[in-house]
Amino acid sequence: MGVLAAPVAGRDYPATFGDFSAWFRTDIDCLDYLRWVRWPDGFRCPWCASEGWLLSDGRYECGACHRRTSVTAGTIFDSTRTPMTVWFHAVWLFATSKDGISAMALRRQLEIGSHQTAWMVLSRLRVASAGHDLDKLSGEVEVDETFFGGATPGQRGRAHGAKLLIAIAVERLPTGGFGRCRMSIIDNAGAYCLRRFLIDNVEPGSTIVTDGWVSYPGACQGLYTHQPHITPAAMAPIFLPGVHRVASLFKRWMLGTHQGSAGWDHLELYLHEFVFRFNRRHSRRRGLVFLRILERGIDHEQVCYKDVIKNKRPKAVDPVPPPPATRRRTPSLSRPAQNRPWRG
């Protein structure tokens, strides 16, 4: 599947919530749009790229290898029992809400059957948003680290203990202000881990602006121009305003939208979502963001519940919702047209 190069609002994606409500009234409408996004030029077999035909059960059969597949097979929507109208509303809320949405709020708004299902829907979208940008940061880039988690008794400085250490990189724009950011959990603040973070996220030849931490010269050696600011800790926000602002916004977002309930094993997914949002904070075409998430969801392979929670921790630090004792099927949001029922 190729990404649409120049999609048009109101034709290729809904420009407003009014368009969204009119376009995706039923599950059939949602599946048809998903089919168009995945195969804009007609069905192509995912195994041999041959043409095929639509079967009566909604699947496709390849004309060459005769394998059968569906529009959701091999995507983040694979093997889901959640109706597509619920999925599309979840993607719209994920794409258009300024501060995102929690699993509890999503469950209440969309009548999702269980908290586990709502949490898993958002987790799949966070996984899909992980490939948020293809281009690395460039130019002048501020880099620093921050801790996430509670205080660790008896530990000071940048030691890795009960708290998680997060590396942050933020572009400085030539005209002032800040561009894109990157965030990632690192094992420690040593030169090797910081260099690995820089290589993965910053274009070689860029200028790396940091504080006076001793690991940065070795992390930048041979690849980047290092510009340190050796100042007291209290002065760091003045010389590195971008990374401190991003760190503050992330922690405030976690405490606000998610009530600080993210488990350590899933913090990387929340970092993906925050970076995805921050890098699109100036976008005025929220419907385009909705389309891009669908495209990434189709390009991404299937995401299972066991894959998301593969690293388990004790319940005291891991609030992943357990499977409910009794399951209630999530109802579809497809609704027939009503002739003003309040008039009797």
Image (cartoon, helix red, strand yellow):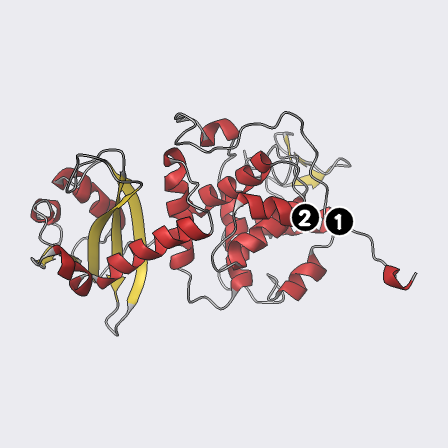
Q: Residue at x 66, y 44 (%)?
A: 84
Q: Residue at x 19, y 37 (%)?
A: 188
Quadrant containing the C terminus is bottom right
- Name the quadrant containing residue 92: bottom right
Residue closer to the observer: 170 or 237: 237
Q: Which mark is residue 85?
A: 2
Number of marks in the image?
A: 2
Q: Are there few (<14), some (14-19), or many (20+) residues within 10 Å of tag 1?
A: some
Q: Which mark is residue 334?
A: 1
Q: Is residue 320 visible?
A: yes
What kind of element bears circle 2? helix
Q: Residue at x 69, y 60 (%)?
A: 21
Badge 1 vs badge 2, beta-carbon distance below 8 Å = yes
Q: Amino acid at mark 1?
A: Ser
Q: Amino acid at mark 2?
A: Thr
Q: Report the side of 230 relative to 148 (left or right).
A: left
What kind of element bears circle 1? loop
